[in-house]
Image (cartoon, rainbow, N blue to C red):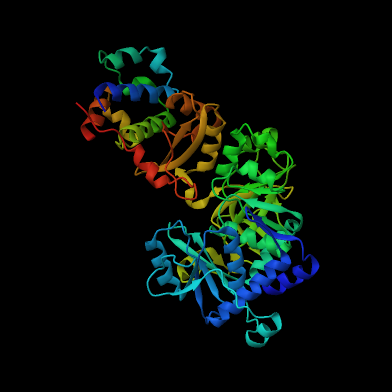
Amino acid sequence: MPFLNRLRELAGDRPGHPAFCDARGECSYATLLSRVEAARGALWRQGIGQGAVVGLALDDEAEHLVATLALLAAGARQIVLATHDPPAVHQQLVARVGVTHVLARPGAALPPGVARVDWPCADGLADAEREAVAPVPAAGLLLLKTSGTTGSMNLVAFDEGQIAAQAARHADYRDERLLRLASIEHNNSKRHRLYCTWAGGTNVFRPAHVDAIDFALSQRVSCLDISRMHAADLADSPDAHRLGALKLRTGGSAVPIALRRAILERGTRQLFVRYAATECGAIAMALPGDHDADETVGRPLPGVELQVLGPHGQALPAGETGEIRLRASGMATGYVDSPSQTAQRFRDGWFHPGDVGALRADGHLIVQGRRDDMIVLNGLNIFPAEIERVLERHPSVAEAAALPLPSAVHGQIPVAAVVLRPGQSVTANELRRFCHQHLGLRTPRRVLVVDRLPKNGQGKTLKRDLADAFQPEDATP
Amino acid sequence: MTDQQVREMLVEALEYASVIALRDKNFGAGFLAGTSEVPIDALDMDSLAEMELCIAIEVNAGVSIVPERLRRIGTLDRLVALIRSRQ
């Protein structure tokens, strides 16, 4: 079912229910539908339908959501031109996917060679008039960016049916008021905003520079979805207890048990840890009672079939560690314009996320890390995440990052960098011994204490940049 | 790394690799001061300890040494000289 038809259902079932709210107030499902319908007509008049590829350059989150739904209803392909990205990145994307139009606020600078679509737009027609001139076309297409295994960016395309199938794993959003701190311009947020809309829930958008906790409470947010980095900040915040009545969802990278316990003790008991991939949506989710020393990500969600494979591609029994593969309703079937990456990650109807893990006898999935990140020291497999978890258990350590240094003799040598908590002092050798007590041969052979870890815009540590800090000291007389 | 830094790094690595002879035979102080020759054979290192020592040298000084070669180097002083010559 196209999103437009789903919106029509929701506008009939719960017309006054808020579809979204932000600092300007609430927008009901009835109002959202009429805005999307009017914008669809206006887009149609500008020739934007199937065949159009529209770059979406709106940082206003609520308006971005309405525009996304209007473009889907128009049958266009759409891709985010994130307003935080520089013009050169926009130009690369425009050329790569053949963007024909850019939808933006009036006066916004556009990449060369594209037609402008000013937002907001409306056709001023009555619904019956619009149906006569602008029939609802086949499903629109959403192009999402995802990081590739080689560091290059991959693109996946989802039609509305695929997004709807993924949304079925989030039917519980129907009764939620959902706040995500990451902007809708990020693909993960965009998907969840659409899932919430599909379910009939309420998307809550935070204005810039407003305290997250104050805002969440003032807007009666019931579900707060944040990155692991934000979760760590929150666990340290003296205000964490104010979130006691909220559901807190996090994921995106390994969430250590120490952090989970800190949130459970100081924040909220309703902690959910999700395992997901852009290529297929949510895969598994640990529920409030599931958190344990194995750092489970929970059981695979309904609609997801997941296996753990051995080195010869055979399915492994419970408890054994191997490569994860899965198939899920709404899953992509490949990458746009990258047959080699598609062949590598999408095989025999399965998606291979590149992660290594194990399924416990009780069905819980334990994700140990990315296969590409695995450090192989003299044949011993070591995951950076296991080193990072141990270091982050040390009371003086705020954050850790483990990485391999290439070695002609030993293959790869594990090393780690840490950022200390304010006011703490501990030597690198003390931390190395602490690791050795818990990790034995898997311990990092060198630990550096640094002021901060190099990170990209999404808060992900740039380990290649960090490796430079491990260059041996120059010889001095 | 200076001569002294290399010596300190080697002592730290040998302690980390649980090379008991370093303390039992009281090699550490004389080696750090550069006043006593320590034959590598006398350290009674097993293969794991040899490997750990080579990893420590590589990760701290950027000098690759194959564990099997260690004993042929002869003494810790010669190992220090080898590391410094290759930096």
Task: Say which residue appears at 57% left-offset and 81% top-offset.
Answer: A44
| Number of on-image labels | 0
| Quadrant in which the N terminus of chain A is drawn | bottom right
Rendered position, A388 above or below A299: above
Rendered position, A266 above or below A52: above
Q: Where in the figure is residue B50, as x and y percent of width and height?
A: 39, 30
Task: Say which residue appears at 64% left-offset and 41% top-offset.
Answer: A214
Q: Where in the figure is residue A267, as x and y percent of width and height?
A: 68, 36
Residue closest to the far right:
A13
Rendered position, A445 above or below A351: above
Rendered position, A224 above or below A445: below
Residue A139, picture quadrant: bottom right
Residue A217, picture quadrant: top right
| Quadrant in which the C terminus of chain A is drawn | top left
- Out of B75 and A398, give the one closest to the viewer: A398
Task: Say which residue appears at 58% left-offset and 68% top-offset.
Answer: A67
Residue closest to the far front:
A124
A259 lies left or right of B84: right
Residue closest to the far bottom:
A132
Q: Where in the figure is residue B13, as x and y percent of width and height?
A: 39, 26
A420 lies left or right of B70: right
Q: Where in the figure is residue A194, as x and y percent of width and height?
A: 64, 63
- Out of A201 and A429, give the one closest to the viewer: A201
B14 lies left or right of A214: left
The reply to whether residue A113 is visible in this rendering is: yes
The reply to whether residue A329 is visible in this rendering is: no
